Amino acid sequence: MQAVTDNVFKALADPTRRAIFEHLSRDGEQTVHALTHRAGVSQPAVSKHLGVLKRARLVRCRHAGRETHYSAQPQALAPLVDWMSVYGAFWRDRFDQLENLLKRMDP
Amino acid sequence: MTDTGPTRTLVIEREMPHPPEKIWRALTEGKLIEEWLMTNDFQPEVGHRFSFRAMPVKNWNGVIECEVLVVEPHARLVYRWGALGLESAVTWTLTRTEGGTHVRMEQSGFASEEGANYKGAKYGWQKFIGNMERVVGGLE
Protein backbone atom coordinates (compact mmCIF):
# COMPACT_ATOMS: atom_id res chain seq x y z
CA MET A 1 0.00 0.00 0.00
CA GLN A 2 2.70 2.47 0.91
CA ALA A 3 4.76 1.75 -2.19
CA VAL A 4 1.68 2.42 -4.28
CA THR A 5 0.99 5.65 -2.42
CA ASP A 6 4.59 6.81 -2.84
CA ASN A 7 4.40 6.19 -6.57
CA VAL A 8 1.22 8.23 -6.80
CA PHE A 9 2.80 11.12 -4.87
CA LYS A 10 5.89 11.08 -7.06
CA ALA A 11 3.92 10.78 -10.27
CA LEU A 12 1.83 13.83 -9.42
CA ALA A 13 4.75 15.90 -8.11
CA ASP A 14 5.62 16.93 -11.67
CA PRO A 15 3.43 19.68 -13.17
CA THR A 16 3.60 18.26 -16.71
CA ARG A 17 2.45 14.85 -15.49
CA ARG A 18 -0.28 16.48 -13.43
CA ALA A 19 -1.47 18.32 -16.52
CA ILE A 20 -1.47 15.11 -18.58
CA PHE A 21 -3.40 13.27 -15.87
CA GLU A 22 -5.94 16.08 -15.49
CA HIS A 23 -6.37 16.25 -19.24
CA LEU A 24 -7.03 12.52 -19.46
CA SER A 25 -9.40 12.65 -16.48
CA ARG A 26 -11.38 15.48 -18.01
CA ASP A 27 -11.44 14.58 -21.69
CA GLY A 28 -11.18 10.80 -21.67
CA GLU A 29 -8.94 8.50 -23.68
CA GLN A 30 -6.23 10.10 -25.83
CA THR A 31 -3.45 8.95 -28.13
CA VAL A 32 0.18 9.77 -27.37
CA HIS A 33 0.14 12.03 -30.44
CA ALA A 34 -2.79 14.05 -29.17
CA LEU A 35 -1.24 14.32 -25.71
CA THR A 36 2.09 15.46 -27.19
CA HIS A 37 0.30 18.14 -29.15
CA ARG A 38 -1.32 19.43 -25.95
CA ALA A 39 1.62 19.05 -23.58
CA GLY A 40 4.08 21.25 -25.46
CA VAL A 41 7.00 18.87 -24.88
CA SER A 42 8.57 16.21 -27.12
CA GLN A 43 6.94 12.85 -27.70
CA PRO A 44 9.73 10.92 -25.94
CA ALA A 45 9.21 13.20 -22.93
CA VAL A 46 5.46 12.59 -22.97
CA SER A 47 6.03 8.84 -23.27
CA LYS A 48 8.36 8.96 -20.29
CA HIS A 49 5.79 10.87 -18.24
CA LEU A 50 3.10 8.38 -19.26
CA GLY A 51 5.39 5.55 -18.11
CA VAL A 52 5.64 7.11 -14.64
CA LEU A 53 1.87 7.62 -14.49
CA LYS A 54 1.35 4.05 -15.61
CA ARG A 55 3.63 2.65 -12.90
CA ALA A 56 1.62 4.62 -10.35
CA ARG A 57 -1.49 3.04 -11.90
CA LEU A 58 -2.87 6.48 -12.64
CA VAL A 59 -3.25 5.69 -16.35
CA ARG A 60 -3.88 2.62 -18.45
CA CYS A 61 -2.95 2.07 -22.09
CA ARG A 62 -4.22 0.00 -24.96
CA HIS A 63 -2.68 -0.49 -28.37
CA ALA A 64 -4.76 -0.04 -31.49
CA GLY A 65 -2.87 -0.35 -34.75
CA ARG A 66 0.18 1.89 -34.56
CA GLU A 67 -1.31 4.14 -31.92
CA THR A 68 -1.26 3.78 -28.14
CA HIS A 69 -4.29 5.15 -26.35
CA TYR A 70 -4.10 6.27 -22.74
CA SER A 71 -6.92 6.73 -20.26
CA ALA A 72 -7.01 7.98 -16.65
CA GLN A 73 -7.54 5.66 -13.69
CA PRO A 74 -8.69 8.16 -11.07
CA GLN A 75 -9.41 5.38 -8.55
CA ALA A 76 -5.62 5.21 -8.09
CA LEU A 77 -6.04 8.38 -6.01
CA ALA A 78 -8.20 6.55 -3.49
CA PRO A 79 -5.35 5.60 -1.12
CA LEU A 80 -4.42 9.28 -0.74
CA VAL A 81 -7.96 10.44 -0.21
CA ASP A 82 -8.65 7.71 2.30
CA TRP A 83 -5.37 8.35 4.07
CA MET A 84 -6.14 12.05 4.47
CA SER A 85 -9.63 11.38 5.71
CA VAL A 86 -8.41 8.79 8.19
CA TYR A 87 -5.76 11.18 9.50
CA GLY A 88 -8.41 13.88 9.70
CA ALA A 89 -10.58 11.61 11.81
CA PHE A 90 -7.61 10.86 14.04
CA TRP A 91 -6.93 14.54 14.79
CA ARG A 92 -10.59 15.43 15.26
CA ASP A 93 -10.83 12.68 17.85
CA ARG A 94 -7.65 14.02 19.53
CA PHE A 95 -9.22 17.49 19.57
CA ASP A 96 -12.21 16.03 21.42
CA GLN A 97 -9.85 14.47 23.97
CA LEU A 98 -7.98 17.75 24.31
CA GLU A 99 -11.24 19.56 25.08
CA ASN A 100 -12.18 16.91 27.63
CA LEU A 101 -8.81 17.38 29.30
CA LEU A 102 -9.19 21.17 29.35
CA LYS A 103 -12.53 20.81 31.15
CA ARG A 104 -10.85 18.69 33.82
CA MET A 105 -7.88 21.02 34.28
CA ASP A 106 -7.80 23.86 36.82
CA PRO A 107 -8.44 27.24 35.22
CA MET B 1 11.85 17.18 1.11
CA THR B 2 12.51 18.21 -2.44
CA ASP B 3 10.81 16.72 -5.45
CA THR B 4 9.35 13.86 -3.48
CA GLY B 5 5.69 14.56 -3.86
CA PRO B 6 3.02 17.19 -3.62
CA THR B 7 2.60 18.80 -0.25
CA ARG B 8 -0.68 18.01 1.36
CA THR B 9 -2.12 19.90 4.24
CA LEU B 10 -4.66 18.94 6.84
CA VAL B 11 -6.16 21.76 8.88
CA ILE B 12 -8.39 21.44 11.93
CA GLU B 13 -9.65 24.53 13.72
CA ARG B 14 -11.74 24.90 16.81
CA GLU B 15 -12.90 27.61 19.15
CA MET B 16 -12.24 26.61 22.77
CA PRO B 17 -13.63 28.42 25.84
CA HIS B 18 -10.26 28.44 27.62
CA PRO B 19 -7.42 30.97 27.69
CA PRO B 20 -4.35 30.34 25.45
CA GLU B 21 -2.14 29.92 28.54
CA LYS B 22 -4.14 26.89 29.67
CA ILE B 23 -4.27 25.30 26.22
CA TRP B 24 -0.53 25.89 25.88
CA ARG B 25 0.01 23.79 29.01
CA ALA B 26 -2.01 20.94 27.51
CA LEU B 27 0.10 21.14 24.35
CA THR B 28 3.50 21.34 26.03
CA GLU B 29 3.46 19.47 29.36
CA GLY B 30 4.34 15.82 28.81
CA LYS B 31 1.91 14.42 31.36
CA LEU B 32 -0.95 16.46 29.97
CA ILE B 33 -0.06 15.66 26.33
CA GLU B 34 -0.21 11.99 27.25
CA GLU B 35 -3.80 12.43 28.43
CA TRP B 36 -5.12 13.47 25.04
CA LEU B 37 -2.52 12.33 22.51
CA MET B 38 0.19 9.78 23.32
CA THR B 39 3.01 8.98 25.72
CA ASN B 40 5.96 11.21 24.91
CA ASP B 41 9.20 12.79 26.10
CA PHE B 42 8.33 16.23 24.79
CA GLN B 43 10.18 19.33 26.03
CA PRO B 44 9.26 22.83 24.82
CA GLU B 45 12.78 23.56 23.53
CA VAL B 46 13.65 24.24 19.92
CA GLY B 47 15.81 21.42 18.58
CA HIS B 48 14.63 18.91 21.20
CA ARG B 49 14.14 15.50 19.63
CA PHE B 50 11.37 13.42 21.10
CA SER B 51 8.96 10.68 20.24
CA PHE B 52 5.33 9.83 20.59
CA ARG B 53 4.80 6.20 21.40
CA ALA B 54 1.84 4.07 20.54
CA MET B 55 1.71 0.34 21.24
CA PRO B 56 4.09 -1.59 18.94
CA VAL B 57 2.35 -3.68 16.32
CA LYS B 58 3.56 -6.00 13.60
CA ASN B 59 5.96 -4.20 11.22
CA TRP B 60 5.82 -0.99 13.21
CA ASN B 61 7.48 -0.21 16.54
CA GLY B 62 4.80 2.36 17.37
CA VAL B 63 7.26 5.24 17.47
CA ILE B 64 6.68 8.62 15.85
CA GLU B 65 9.95 10.53 15.68
CA CYS B 66 9.61 14.24 16.31
CA GLU B 67 11.68 17.37 16.74
CA VAL B 68 10.60 20.71 18.14
CA LEU B 69 10.95 23.38 15.45
CA VAL B 70 9.22 26.46 16.86
CA VAL B 71 8.20 27.47 20.39
CA GLU B 72 6.39 30.78 20.82
CA PRO B 73 4.77 30.51 24.26
CA HIS B 74 0.97 30.69 24.27
CA ALA B 75 0.91 31.32 20.52
CA ARG B 76 2.68 28.87 18.25
CA LEU B 77 4.23 25.41 18.45
CA VAL B 78 5.68 23.44 15.54
CA TYR B 79 7.13 19.95 15.54
CA ARG B 80 8.35 17.57 12.89
CA TRP B 81 6.32 14.38 12.83
CA GLY B 82 7.95 11.39 11.16
CA ALA B 83 6.90 7.77 11.03
CA LEU B 84 7.42 4.97 8.54
CA GLY B 85 9.45 7.18 6.22
CA LEU B 86 6.69 9.76 5.91
CA GLU B 87 7.61 13.23 7.09
CA SER B 88 5.30 16.04 8.06
CA ALA B 89 5.19 19.10 10.30
CA VAL B 90 2.50 19.74 12.87
CA THR B 91 1.82 23.41 13.60
CA TRP B 92 -0.34 24.58 16.49
CA THR B 93 -1.50 28.19 16.45
CA LEU B 94 -3.37 29.73 19.38
CA THR B 95 -5.19 33.02 18.91
CA ARG B 96 -6.92 34.72 21.83
CA THR B 97 -10.57 35.51 21.19
CA GLU B 98 -13.31 37.16 23.22
CA GLY B 99 -14.62 33.84 24.50
CA GLY B 100 -11.35 31.95 24.77
CA THR B 101 -8.97 30.72 22.10
CA HIS B 102 -9.06 29.85 18.43
CA VAL B 103 -7.03 26.65 18.11
CA ARG B 104 -5.62 25.74 14.72
CA MET B 105 -3.72 22.55 13.94
CA GLU B 106 -2.06 22.17 10.57
CA GLN B 107 -0.26 19.05 9.43
CA SER B 108 1.57 19.57 6.18
CA GLY B 109 4.14 18.04 3.90
CA PHE B 110 2.95 14.49 3.59
CA ALA B 111 5.82 13.51 1.36
CA SER B 112 8.29 10.72 1.85
CA GLU B 113 12.01 11.23 2.05
CA GLU B 114 14.04 9.80 -0.76
CA GLY B 115 15.46 6.47 0.31
CA ALA B 116 13.06 6.08 3.17
CA ASN B 117 10.18 5.08 0.94
CA TYR B 118 10.08 1.48 1.94
CA LYS B 119 11.02 1.77 5.58
CA GLY B 120 7.60 0.66 6.61
CA ALA B 121 6.66 -0.82 3.30
CA LYS B 122 4.72 -3.74 4.63
CA TYR B 123 2.70 -1.50 6.83
CA GLY B 124 -0.05 0.48 5.18
CA TRP B 125 -0.73 3.96 6.37
CA GLN B 126 -4.41 3.39 6.89
CA LYS B 127 -3.64 0.39 9.03
CA PHE B 128 -1.06 2.41 10.93
CA ILE B 129 -3.47 5.21 11.70
CA GLY B 130 -6.22 2.74 12.48
CA ASN B 131 -4.00 1.03 15.02
CA MET B 132 -2.82 4.28 16.50
CA GLU B 133 -6.41 5.32 16.96
CA ARG B 134 -7.35 2.02 18.56
CA VAL B 135 -4.33 2.10 20.84
CA VAL B 136 -4.94 5.67 21.93
CA GLY B 137 -8.62 4.93 22.35
CA GLY B 138 -7.74 2.00 24.60
CA LEU B 139 -5.83 4.28 26.93
CA GLU B 140 -8.90 6.15 27.98
Image (cartoon, coloured by chain):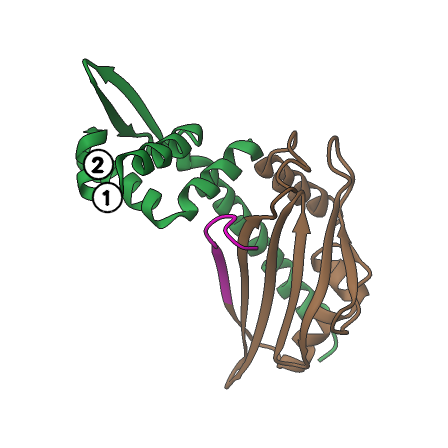
- The residue closer to the viewer here, A83 or A49, is A49
Residue displayed at 64% across by 39% down: B128
Quadrant assignment, res B138: top right
Quadrant assignment, res A22: top left
Residue displayed at 39% across by 29% down: A54
Which amino acid lies under the numbered mark 1 shown in the image of this protein? Ala
Q: Are marks 2 and 1 in contact (CB under 8 Å)?
A: yes
- Chain identifier of the green chain: A
Find numbered disc 2 in the image and state the secondary structure of the residue it sits on.
helix
Tell whether A69 sits left or right of A100: left
Residue A39: numbered disc: 1
The residues bearing labels 2 and 1 have C-alpha atoms spaced at a distance of 6 Å
Q: Please give the chain letter of the residue carrying mark 2.
A: A
Which amino acid lies under the numbered mark 2 shown in the image of this protein? Leu
Answer above or below: position of B53 versus A75. Answer: below
Stretch in magenta: B1-13
Residue displayed at 78% across by 70% down: B29
Q: Give percent across and percent down for residue B135.
A: 72, 42
Question: Which color is chain B depicted in?
Answer: brown
Q: Badge 2 is on which residue?
A: A35
